[in-house]
Image (cartoon, helix red, strand yellow):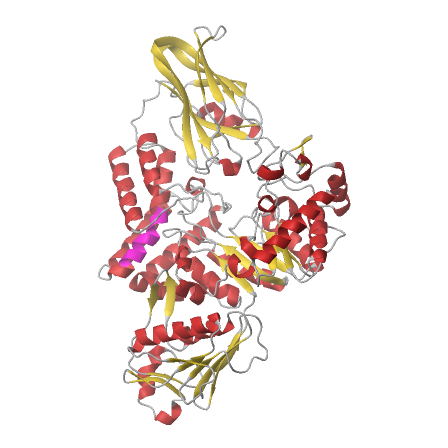
Amino acid sequence: MKKLTMLCLSTMLSAPMLLADVVLVENGQPKGRIVCDTSAVNRQGAELLKKFVKRISGAELPIVKSGNAVRKNDVVIGLGDTSSLTEDGFRLKEDNGKLFISSGGDKGALYGVVSLLEDNLGVNYYGDNEYSFQPSKTIVLTGIDRYENPAFRYRQSQSYALSDPDYRAFMRFEEPADEFAGGYWVHTMNRLLPSDVYGKSHPEYYSYINGERRPGHASQWCLNNPEVLEKAVAAIDSVFKANPGRNMISVSQNDGNFTNCACELCAAVDSIEGSPSGNFVRFLNKLAERFPDKQFSTLAYLFTMHPPKITKPLPNVNIMLCDIDCKREVPLTDNASGQDFMKALEGWSKISDNIFVWDYGINFSNTSTPFPNFPILQKNIQTFRDHHVKMHFSQIAGYRGGDFSEMRAWMVSKLMWNPEADSDSLMRAFMKDYYGEAAPYIYDYEKLLEGGLLASNRDLWIYDSPVSHKDGMLNQKLIKRYDELWDKAEKAVAGDSARLARVQRSRLPLQYSKLEIARSNGITDVAATENMLEDFRKKADHYGLKYLNENGNTPGEYCELFRTRYLHEPGFNKARGAKINFIEGPDKKYAALGETALTDELFGGSNFIEGWVGWEGRDGSFVVDLGKETEFSHVGADFLHQIGGWVLLPEKITVSISDDGKAFKEIGEDAREEDRTPSIKFVEFAVDTPAPVKARYVKMDVTGTKMCPSWHFGVGHPSWFFMDEVIVK
């Protein structure tokens, strides 16, 4: 029989009662009971069922302990046939007027309850305390006999709504605390052997990079140092003892690229194995031998993404493979970056069936900007399943007000459970329930956006800027059409306050993108842009949009900065259009941009990929030719602070002036303390003179940090500084 939904209940009530196998509620009165044992998971399932039955019917089903005689109309949680069930799997089976929900282990019984609520009682759960159901005074279940197993035994994603335990249950999401001892689940080496504790006394424990040992938060271990192994064993043993019942731990590289040890012993293993992962797998195998009853997870990430040629992970070594460098406009099988990852996945799957894939579907630099990767979700998840992946983290959402945050998490939850579920059908179903009459317009918007991306032939990157797509999927003609569709969507639900709020919240990424594109083109209508900015600020505040990127920058900060940085009339800068003569010029790929970008009165945004001019691992020096003798008292330059991209503020700038462009006189310098904060910043280094000076030529020498320090992700490697507008006023 087809699964019964709440839409069918009124029809069922008119049928002969002998067809009604399990009567939970009749005319608002409880007829059945919920029977379960005292285990936490089964009890959670029982309470969830009780809660929603009461919401639907007004009746409160009693919960009784297992051991009581099971009677007709009871729902029995945790008992029944478990054959063919795997971890988190469940079976729902009606037997002689009683419904049994059995479990394959872990949270199977809870997910059985969720399946009953969704498929038989018509409950839909979308976000933080956002759910729907159809009220009915009578609830009758009939003909239920099905079982389900998940495609992945562990399924994890991101959502602001995970603080709601019912939401998490409906999404069937796991969290690291469910699996990993003491929260040791990724980037754990510095936590196990802190460089703050051992760095000074034992620098030999840490990576040899560019000619010396470099202890630091992102430095890796010297994996061929026997003392490191013993220290790690002792630390791991203490973690397991402090967390009884947890049998898995991550011993994984610190966050950062190319920070592995290159000492003679480590380099020799790298050469033999053909990848730095060889050293890590060898080390993890040693730990796995010491703790044969435990599971050890380690990263295959950035420099360790590709598998070793010789060494195979032991069965209790879990490989957490990450596709962070891949572009997202097409499936992983269809572009060069994805195909490189596929080579790694195929290699690991040949030597291990204990693989955890960490997939990325989020714009870290601009979480509230359109990111139309929905068409690739199903294909990528199917690819992971087909390569023996057992655990999966889809890092796709996070913040309220992000790009379709609720729909992303919901769709991924369905696809990680069943990769054969059609993604387009899922999208349509979600939009219909969540947006109501606005759904057709929002669906057309998303599909137009997806087509615009593919037609533009541009990459979709997890560090993208909306400005990167202003000639593609975010060109002015398309934006006009997008706004028309959103206007129709708002009008369609104008009388439904809950759905109107959802529509307006989901429109925020387009509003933000329009602001970013406007400032990159140069503000021509200050008043109109101010109105657009204020509308975005009000709605972002009203709908709880807290952050615009992973660095924690808020909409309020963005709007204030926008006003002071971008909303100005042309001609404020006396260096506008001035010629730049480089003495120590930027890196080659920024040379052409540097000829105009430093004096065009257009300030760069939060991502170094647009509008910024960069120097790597060295100082910078240039002369600004103002074209004629000019009076001024302020000379400054704008610098980007974005430590995640290895972009650090310079140590100082020194400013000199000249009448002839040959003999220069220093007028001052601006030096700053090191800034370790994670937020993205725009910082002006400037020299002000006590009285105006006159000159045609202004020389600026920039002293960069040149090397990433010990606390940084790129310890031991060259750092960047990026600058934008040179300001003379």
Is residue 21 shown above or below 432?
A: below
| Residue 245, image x, y percentages | 57, 63
Main SS of the magenta segment?
helix
On the image, the x and y values in percent for residue 7 come to 34, 78
The residue most toward the left is: 495
Residue numbers of the magenta segment: 500-510
- Give 345 or 267, whichever is nearer the viewer: 267
Spot occupied by residue 518 in the image (x, y as percentages of width and height):
35, 37
Name the residue nearer the viewer: 611 or 243: 243
Residue at figure coordinates x 31%, y 57% from the top left:
502
> Left or right: where does residue 348 sit relative to residue 463?
right
Q: Nearer the viewer, residue 247 or 517?
A: 247
Across and down, in percent, residue 198 comes to 62, 38
Along the horizontal axis of the image, is 94 left or right of 284?
left
Residue at 58 percent of width and 48 percent of height: 188
Residue 383 found in image quarter: bottom right
Q: Is residue 218 magenta?
A: no
Vertical arrangement, residue 357 with respect to residue 652, above or below:
below
Q: Quadrant of the C terminus?
A: top left
What is the quadrant of the N terminus in the image? bottom left
Can I make out residue 134 in this image? no
Q: Is residue 506 magenta?
A: yes
